[in-house]
Image (cartoon, helix red, strand yellow):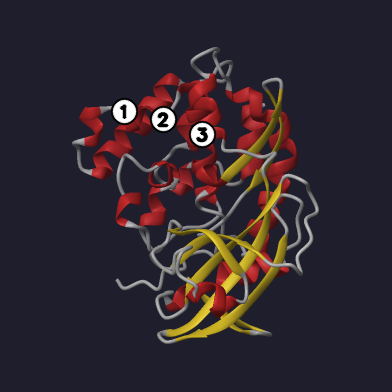
Amino acid sequence: MGTFAYHADNPKMSAITGNTVISGGRRSNQPFCHCYGVKNPKWKKTNENGHFYMYTYNMWEVPENMKVSNEIGVMPTVMDFYIHFKSDMFFPVVDYGLAKTPKGELAWIVFEQNDDFSSPWVYAHFERRKRQLYAHNLFNPLIKLIPELERIEDYFHGGGVYSLGPELQFCQHDGIVSDLIVRFVPFASFPNQGLFELEECDQTCNSNLAMCMAPETRTAHYDRRADVFSLARLLSWWEHGNFWRFDDELKQMPFDDAFRISCERQIEMGLDGIGSHVMEKALAFNPEDRYQTLSEFFEALT
C-alpha cells in the first residue's frame, strides 16, 4: 500500500496543512495514518506541559467502512468522533481540516497532549523491577474512566474502542495512579464495521496492540464486548507483565496459537484477591460467554 508520509525535513506537510511540522512523520497503528509534532502561532497552550500533535489520514487509503460525511466533508469515522464527542478523558482537539494533495484529500486533526500523562506500559515495565504491581492499583481511576468509555460505546450504538489497552495514558504521584485517560482511539467505531487495517508489525506477539484486541476484532463481527476483553488483558499485563514479548516459544508460533496460549496463562495467573472465574469469563473467546459490559466486569472485579 502506498503512503503519503511527509517527514519533518520535508516542507510539504507544513504547506498542505498550514501547521509547521517540527517532528515525526511516523505511522500510527493504521497504514493510512501518520503522527507529527506541530506548532502554529494561533494555538494557545492550556497546560505548561502541553505539546501539539497532528494526526493525518490519507483519505484515498481509508477503507469505505471507516469513512463518514459531515459538515466539512468526508473524513475518517474516528476523526468525526474526536470533533463531536466531548469528554475530559481525551486530550483536547485544537484544530482540524481537510486539504488537497496530488493523490487526493488529506484529513488532519491536532490535539494538545499533556506530558503529565505517560504510558502505563513503560512505567510498569520499570516499576515492576522495584515492587509488585496489582490490578487493584487501577481501580480508583477506573471508577471515573469506565462511565466515559461506555459513553463512547453508546455514541457508536453499541460499538467500542477496541484498542483500549495500548491507548491508555495515566498520571501518577509517588507511585499512586490518580488518573487514566484515553490518548487515542484509532479503531473506535460502530459494531460490525468490517476488518480493521493493521500494520504488519501490529499482527505479531511483539505488538501490545494485537495482543490486547479481542479475537473477534480480527473478523468483521464485533461490538462493545470486545472492550471487556481488552481491559482484562490490560489489568493482567499491569500485574504480571507482557510476557508474550519475551517468550521465544510463543513468538515462534502462529499468531492465533500464541494469542490463545497467552490468554490461558493470564487466566491461570489470575489477579490478586480476585477469583480465577472472573478472568476466565472476561477473556472468553466467545463474546456471548463474556461479561456483556465494562460495568458488569468492573462490578465482578470489585
Classify mark 1: helix, strand or loop: loop
Cα distance in 3D space between marks 1 and 3: 14 Å
Q: What label does residue 52 carry, if any? A: none
Q: Do the residues under discs 2 and 1 have CB atoms within 8 angstroms?
A: yes
- Residue 223's place in the image compared with 138, above or below, is below
Q: Are marks 1 and 3 in contact (CB under 8 Å)?
A: no
| Circle 3: residue type | Trp
Q: What is the secondary structure assignment of the residue under circle 3?
A: helix
In this figure, which residue is indicated by the disc labeled 1?
246
Q: Nearer the viewer, residue 211 or 96?
A: 96
Mark 2 and mark 3 in contact? Answer it, CB < 8 Å.
yes
Residue drawn at point x = 51 percent, y = 78 percent? 106
Q: Quadrant of residue 49?
A: top right
Q: Earlier in the sequence, mark 2 or mark 3?
A: 3
**Which residue is disc 2 drawn over?**
242
Which of labels 2 and 3 is toward the front? Answer: 3
Q: Is residue 64 left or right of residue 278?
A: left
Q: What residue would you read off at disc 3?
A: 121
Q: Residues within 10 Å of mark 1 (few under 14, many from 20)?
A: few
- Residue 218: percent from left, percent from top: 36, 56
Above or below 163: residue 140: above
Q: Spatial distance from mark 2 to mark 1, Cα to Cα?
A: 8 Å
Q: Residue at x 56, y 71 (%)?
A: 77
What is the secondary structure assignment of the residue under circle 2? loop
Q: In the displayed image of the protein, which residue is found farthest to the top?
A: 131
Q: Quadrant of the C terminus?
A: top right
